Amino acid sequence: MLLPVAIFAGFAAMAGWALMRDDPSSIPSAMTGREAPPVGQTTLPGKVQLTDEMLRQPGVKLVNFWASWCPPCRAEHPALTEFAKEMPVYGIDLKDPEAGAVRFLSEHGDPFRAIATDPRGRTAIDWGVTAPPETFIIDGDGKVLYRFAGPLIEGNLDNIFMPELQKARAAE
């Protein structure tokens, strides 16, 4: 007779805990504080190949998982273009037909200093990516400082992502 009450109390406690977190919709990244996983060994035609060594070069940098078929990726593209004026922005093209990715970059501009492709999604799994777009802040040692899931637009960009980027730059 007390079992249904106990089950309900357990669910209520879990829901209360979830609501008290800073951002109840965010999924914490297991990669934060760890070395960035390897990137793919392929790139798009005419583009610079992203390498693991590039992620370990001095300075804060961004790694963005994107795809031409992804509407939120299209929405955040202007923000990535602005970031590329100040810092290295690297792209990992996720499960994208090569022709579509090349066309997207030629039409909208290419903010990426180097690109890796991930045609089967294995690199995304290693990085803990759930769906594009996702952007990682990487330090000068190649360590993941922060993961942002979703498009870098409006409130997300100003209220959530920028404070983390400013923290990373200050610690540099």
Image (cartoon, rainbow, N blue to C red):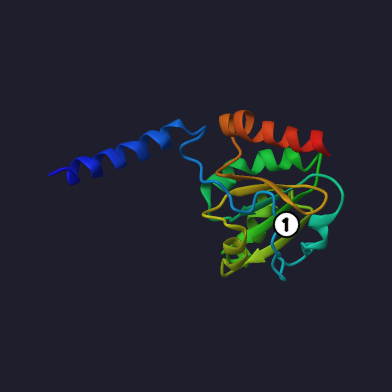
Q: Which residue is mark 1?
A: 35
Q: Look at the picture and state if 101 lies above or below 133.
A: below
Q: Nearer the viewer, residue 57 or 87?
A: 57
Residue, x 64% and y 47% (percent of image)? 135
Using residue 106 as the reference point, say whether residue 75 is left or right of it: left
Residue, x 57% and y 42% (percent of image)? 151
Q: Look at the picture and state if 60 lies above or below 48.
A: above
Q: Residue 95: where, in percent of width, then height?
A: 56, 64
How would you rate the neighbour count of disc 1 (Cα within 10 Å): few for under 14, some for 14-19, many for 20 or more? some
How many circles with numbers are drawn on the protein? 1
Q: Secondary structure at mark 1?
A: loop
Q: Residue 20: where, in percent of width, then height?
A: 45, 31
Residue 97 placement: quadrant: bottom right
Q: Look at the picture and state if 107 lies above or below 160.
A: below
Residue, x 63% and y 29% (percent of image)? 158
Give the residue at the far right of this rendering: 58
Q: Residue 4: where, in percent of width, then height?
A: 18, 44
